[in-house]
Amino acid sequence: MKIVKKGSILLVSAGLLVSMATGCSSSGSGSSSSPKEGASNPAQTEKKENVTLKFLQFTANGSQEQTLKDMIQAFETANPGIKVDPEIVDYNNYYTKLNTEIASGSPPDVFEVGYENFVTYAAKNTLLDLTPVIAKDTAFKPEAFKGLAYDAFKYQGKQYGLVEDFSDVVLFYNKDLFDKAQVKYPDANWTWKDELAAAEKLTDAKNGVWGTYSPIQFYEFYKTIAQNGGGIWSADGKPTVNSKQNIEALNWMLDKARKYKVSPPLNDDTFNQPDADLNAFKSGKIAMLRAGIWNFGRFADAPFKWDIALEPGNTQKAHHFFADGLVVAGKTKNADAAWKFIKFLSSDPAAVNERIAKGWSVPAVSDEKVMDAYYKQTPPESKKVVTDALNSLVLPPVGPIPEKWSDLQKTIGDELDKAKLKPDYTAEQALNAAQEKVLKLVNP
């Protein structure tokens, strides 16, 4: 399964980040129109500011360039005197260009950033603290966004960005296989035990049909341990990789194949190939699959009925949250205008409706009337599950070492691979070893 959303978790070059200017301050703030009013009533703009915002972004690259252009035009119409100069960069080169501009002392006024990279930029004092700007904007309501999604772009209690769009991972299921086996469809109350009981009835090894599947890798691990009350870090930032809850969760991941045999064998090279699980689901060989919502299009023409549900948890629900945020450079000279722009692009109906109509990711707004257009785009029938998952989102566990995010992934991922491929290497051994390595990352 491609667990990584395109563009949302690209890694920041540590060398360039070290050279970033620190301690940047803003150059003013002020109130602006409500996110729900900015596009429809240009007269609400208090004055012509006659400024041009430089906007660097990557998510429009490849298919949504015109959509972005239309959204910017709507913003400029609603805000006379503010012009936006966008530059769209392909995501493979985006962070290299962004870091170069920041290091040179000429960052864009506004730019996009995935959550993992957001933490690193915020920690380096590269971003404008929006907290006082928001406090002065009495028309702005944080409730315009899904609460946990809005809070994701806080750092040390301060708001540094607005969530622009998100994607998550849910449980896909083959309704035809469920009907054939006379198994009840998954619902929001399902636990791991319910999933296992259904998977045992749905598995038909002779015909190569498996009841359930999820990959054993870093991203799936940190989400699954959260479903058992575990985590990579304690509340005070100490590594807890080998906690009891985490060991139990990893055993659950392994046992579905080894003990219960409701998932493909862990040494099956067929399922170790890119997109193998997605192809198997589409060909009717997997009854339940944890996969990203960006696969809706891939499965649209599947030769069977399918739908989605919230993932089962053990002690609690937990779902991935991959988000792109809009942030303002700490060195901007156009703080007021930049705030108006990121507010508009992330939550104004003029922008949000355009995003939904053109199929450009999913906005994290709370207005159900606005989101209704998204829910009506089927399949899947249960589209609202996508936003319901935000109520139990799990942020990527960058912890106290965001600059070592790639090292953290590899450190834990290597041990997960050993547990997966070596039957005599237990979950406890793997996580004990990972714990020691993570401790060395924190205290080299």
Image: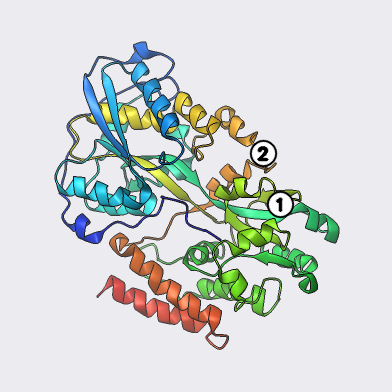
Residue under numbered circle 2: 378
Residue type marked 2: Thr
- Seen in the image, is 98 located left or right of residue 227? left
* Disc 1 versus disc 2: nearer the observer: 2
Apparent side of residue 141 relative to residue 421 in the rendered image (left or right): left
Figure quadrant of residue 53: top left
Tell me the number on the disc at residue 57: none
- Dot 2 falls on a residue whose secondary structure is loop
Instruction: Determine whether 2 is above or below 99 in the image.
Output: below
Query: Given the image, on which type of amino acid does mark 1 rest?
Result: Asp
**Residue shown at 45% from the left, 78% from the top:** 415
Quadrant in which the C terminus appears: bottom left
- The quarter of the picture where the N terminus appears is bottom right
Q: Inspect this view and state whether residue 140 appears.
A: no
- Tell me the residue at 48%/51% (across/down): 321
Tell me where residue 423 appears, x and y as whole percent: 58, 85
Question: Of helix, strand and loop, which one carries label 1?
Answer: loop
Residue 109: % across, % down: 24, 35
- Could you tell me residue 264's position as x and y percent? 66, 73
- Looking at marks 1 and 2 on the same chain, the residue that comes earlier in the sequence is marked by 1
